[in-house]
Amino acid sequence: QVQLVESGGGSVQPGGSLRLSCAASGIDFSLSVMGWYRQAPGKQRELIASITSHGTTGYIDSVKGRFTISRDNAKKTLYLQMSSLKPEDTAIYYCHPNPPRGPGYWGQGTQVTVSS
């Protein structure tokens, strides 16, 4: 059984920071390209950052320089360090293998709210 459990979200002011975690089980985590996705109200879920099994990373332009994706293969955990947060970062954040295939194994996500 695949389980992806996100945590670490919360409510912060613009310019603040959060560190998200994703605990994975039931997948070959160390061999998987992993990604962080987010879904803002009224919008589709989008990939914002990815990381290969060996640590090569990629980001969409809107989060470059502000977000850092990382992983601990021994702990089967994915991380997203977010800084200089903006109101437009408000969304539910999910972790998942990248690219997803079929319906995927989406968890509940963790809510990030950035407001003044």
Image: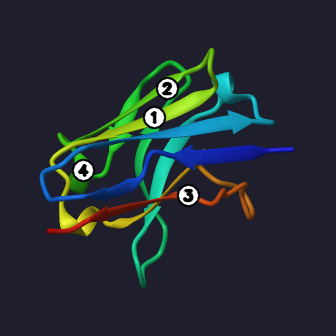
Helix, strand or loop at label 2? It is strand
Q: Which of marks 2 and 1 is nearer the N terminus?
A: 2
The span from disc 3 to disc 1 (Cα, nearest Å) is 13 Å
Q: Which of marks 3 and 4 is nearer the N terminus?
A: 4
Q: Are marks 4 and 2 in contact (CB under 8 Å)?
A: no
The residue that label 3 is drawn on is: 109
Residue under the image location 50 percent in, 44 percent down: 35
Q: Which of marks 2 and 3 is nearer the N terminus?
A: 2
**Few, some or many C-alpha atoms within 10 Å of disc 1 (few <14, some 14-19, many ≥20)?**
many
Residue 97 at least partly seen: no
Helix, strand or loop at label 4? It is helix
The residue that label 4 is drawn on is: 63
Looking at the picture, tell me which residue is in the foreground, 45 or 111: 111
Q: Do the residues labelled 2 and 1 touch (CB within 8 Å)?
A: yes
Helix, strand or loop at label 3? It is loop
Instruction: Give percent across and percent down for residue 60.
Output: 30, 52
Picture quarter with the C terminus? bottom left
The span from disc 1 to disc 4 (Cα, nearest Å) is 15 Å
**Few, some or many C-alpha atoms within 10 Å of disc 2 (few <14, some 14-19, many ≥20)?**
many
Q: Which amino acid does label 3 sit on?
A: Gly
Residue 71 shows which numbered tag? 2
Residue 79 shows which numbered tag? 1
Q: Quadrant of residue 18?
A: top left
